[in-house]
Amino acid sequence: MRTDYPGHDRIYQRNRNDPDYAGWFKYDEMIEYWQLSWRPLTQKNAFPKQGKLLELGCGAGNPSIFLAQAGYNVTGIDIAPTAIAWAIENAFKANILVTFMQGDVLRLTEVADASFNIALDSRCFHCIIGSDRAQFLRTAHRVLKHSGILVINTMCNEVPATPYWNNYFDVQTRCTIHDGLATRYVGDSNDILQEIIQSSFRVLDVEVLPRRNEEDIAELQVIAEKR
């Protein structure tokens, strides 16, 4: 399937011109998402409480900044140049040190082998399509130290019966399709879990967060150790 990963930059260009947005989400949505999803995930026993953390698909840097404020040594990477510029600006405003770089999460050519304790998927994995998904996991495995931790937070299971999903979601591929380009993969949670296991990770914790409303999608949260 055809993809356009660099096309995410158009969304960040649009959102950056809107004062209501903190990045991909509006400010209030971002705070709510951190409180209901990311923060509980980081408080799980299997989530390391310190170390070098690489956020994959960091966008405008919101989770990276929160995690740096919590004491992690954080690097964020994203393919979208507008997102990285925004992330640098957000970190400056928060007066917190985070390293941000533009790059391809499928290759991470800028990142040395075994250099991070934690690789955090910032809702990027469901934007990765087809065979690229295995490449994403292989690359995350490569940059993690021995017994390093991969954290995945991704959309899963059934999609809402709304006009958007009825128009753009392809049931056979489990992908949203826009103008012939696959943009999101919403797989079965068990299938996604198997992808992670087959990429030489040992699952330490797994949870499916149910949909919060009729227009929402369930989330699969996985904490796995590099084997």
Image: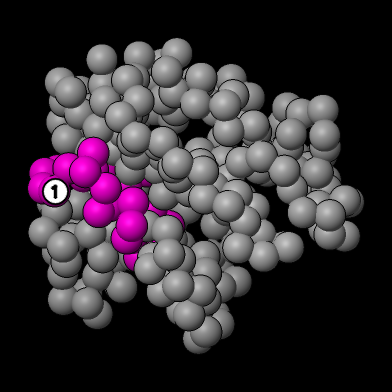
Query: For residue 118, which quarter of the picture?
Result: top left
Quarter of the picture containing the N terminus is top right
The vertical placement of 148 against 138, above or below, is: below
| Residue 138 makes an appearance in the image | yes
Q: Which residues are magenta?
A: 39-63
Amino acid, disc 1: Lys
Quarter of the picture containing the C terminus is top left
Q: Is residue 95 left or right of residue 19?
A: left
Q: Is residue 208 left or right of residue 163?
A: left
- The residue located at (19%, 52%) in the rendering is 74
- The residue located at (72%, 43%) in the rendering is 158
Residue 89 among those drawn in magenta:
no
In percent of width and height, residue 45 lies at 21, 43
Q: Is residue 169 left or right of residue 111?
A: right
- The residue located at (22%, 77%) in the rendering is 94
Mark 1 sits on what residue?
49
Image mark count? 1
In percent of width and height, residue 4 lies at 64, 41
Coloring scheme used: one colour
Residue 50 among those drawn in magenta:
yes
- The residue located at (54%, 80%) in the rendering is 17
In percent of width and height, residue 67 lies at 23, 59
SS category of the residue bearing label 1: loop
| Residue 110 makes an appearance in the image | no
The vertical placement of 168 against 21, above or below, is: above
In percent of width and height, residue 142 lies at 28, 21
Around disc 1, counting alpha carbons within 10 Å, would you say few (fewer than 14), some (14 to 19), or many (20 or more)? few
- Taking depth in this image into account, of 87 and 41 the one nearest to the observer is 41
